[in-house]
Structure formats: structure tokens, C-alpha cells
Image (spheres, grey):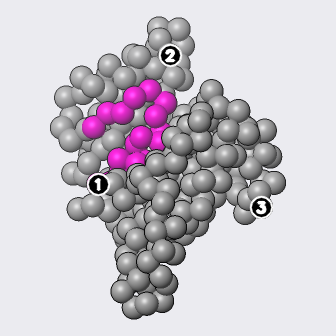
Amino acid sequence: MTPERIRNLLDAVSTGTISVDKAMEELRLLPFEDLGFAKVDHHRALRRGFPEVIFGPGKTPEQIRAIATRLSRQAVNVLVTKTTRQAFDELRVEFPTATWHETAKAIAIEASATPKTEAKVAIVSAGTADLPIAEEAALTATLSGVPVERVYDVGVAGLHRLTAHRDVLSSARVLIVVAGMEGALPSVVAGLVGSIVIAVPTSVGYGASFGGLAALLGMLTSCAPGIAVVNIDNGFGAGYLAALFLTSC
């Protein structure tokens, strides 16, 4: 349930377009709906500006479909992260307009594509191996109503690739910088721009990267100011945070 839908519902009651009983029927599932295996939070969009997101791992395709069905009834964008093609095939039976994002391993069912802001976020990735997480961040920001620009494969092993995109880096209000290995790229980017940088460590790297821990610690101990760090492989969290910065200010 979005703020716009609540407002329209109240306006309809005040003008007599719908009855109080009908409005009560619309609101009866708030604040959450208990499915037994999940309690679907229909108030999330009202509180946070973006509806509840379905985290795919650990859920069966049938469970994902049931949650998505309940969310879609509230006319909100539905996002399933870190999921499978099998789950998409299950959802597509009921939602023919659902889209499968192969790189991000995510499913989107769009109810509204209306941008909420003209301020853009730049998604910057160190290497091609970081693209699944970068694309998860990009998809989340896009569904949140934020324009996205991508700058990919510009890691510190060849800084001339990064500096070739100074115009994009400088024009973005928020930058999401995704890197594995030693995780140095966010520090470099934050040293070049005056905008907020959201650093995303990925689990990409050789043995001593410890599944992204080295990148995470490097980003947390960066000497460059203005960096916020999310958890390992949390592209969704980065896209969400960027959208929150840009749509709530």
C-alpha cells in the first residue's frame, strides 16, 4: 500500500465515490498479512518509501509466488532478489509482465515506472565479475524511481579507465561503488568526487579475500571521507540506500 493509494482512497471516501465499507475492505490487510510461512508487510512502502522485497534464498518458488501475489494486490513494484530462473517460471504463470534479470538474478513485477527524482545515481563496478551485485543495485534503484547510469569494469588495476568517466562521476548525486578483491575502488572514487559514495564489497576474489571480508574491511577503514558501507554482496541494500538519499531529501 503506497502513500498515493492511501491518499486516493481517503479522497474517494470524502467525495462519496466509494463507501466506508469498501474502504475498510481495501485496508483490512494492513499492516500485514499472515500467510503462515510469511507475514507480508503491506505497511513497508508507507514507512520506508519502498515495498517489502522478497529475498529469494531459502524460499520455494511456490512461496515466492504467494508472497508476490499478495504484494502485487497493493499496486506496488515487486522485487525478488538473489533468486532462480525456476522461481521466475513459477511467477510468470500469474504475472506475464514479470521480467527476469539474468545478471542480477532478480525478478521484477512493475506496477509503476514513474521517476521520483531527476537526481541520478551512478553504479560503478571494479570488474566484470562484480556485475551481478552492481546490477542488483541498479535494478533496486530503478524500481525505487531513481535514474541510473552505469560505469563498469573500471577497477584500480587500470585507473585510466575510471578517469575517462570523470563527467559521469561528477554529475551523480550518489555513487554506488562495487568491488571485490582488496576493495580499493570506493576509496579512489571518494577521493575524486564530492558526492555520497556507497561502497559494496563483493565475494569476488582469491583465497585471502575471504569471500569479501578483505574488501569489506578495506572499505570500512578507508581514509576517504563520505563513504557508507553495506554488507558483502548487498547490492539491494546499496540501491535502496541510494534511493532513500535521493527521494527523501
Q: Position of residue 41 (x, y in %)?
A: 46, 47
Q: CA distance from mark 3 to mark 1?
A: 32 Å
> Relative to 222, does residue 4 appear above or below in the rendering?
below
Q: Earlier in the sequence, mark 1 or mark 2?
A: 2
Residue closer to the observer: 146 or 152: 146
Q: Magenta includes 230?
A: yes
Judging depth in this view, the residue of 196 and 114 nearest the camera is: 114
Magenta stretch: helix, strand or loop mostly: helix
Q: Are marks 2 and 3 in contact (CB under 8 Å)?
A: no
How far apart marks 1 and 2 lie (CA) works out to 29 Å
Specify whether residue 101 is in view: no
Identity of the residue drawn at 32% across and 62% down: 247
Q: Are marks 1 and 2 in contact (CB under 8 Å)?
A: no
Pair 2/3: label in front: 3
Q: Which residue is mark 2?
A: 211
Span colored in magenta: 228-245
**Which quarter of the figure is the C terminus placed in?**
bottom left
Q: Residue at x 25, y 38 (%)?
A: 227
Looking at marks 2 and 3 on the same chain, the residue that comes earlier in the sequence is marked by 3
Mark 3: few, some, or many residues within 10 Å (few <14, many ≥20)? few
Callout 2 environment at 10 Å: few (<14), some (14 to 19), or many (20+)? some
Residue 25, position in %: x, y? 52, 67
Between the residue at mark 2 and the residue at mark 3, the CA separation in whole angstroms equals 37 Å
User: How far across and down, in percent of the image, does residue 61 sit?
Assistant: 73, 38
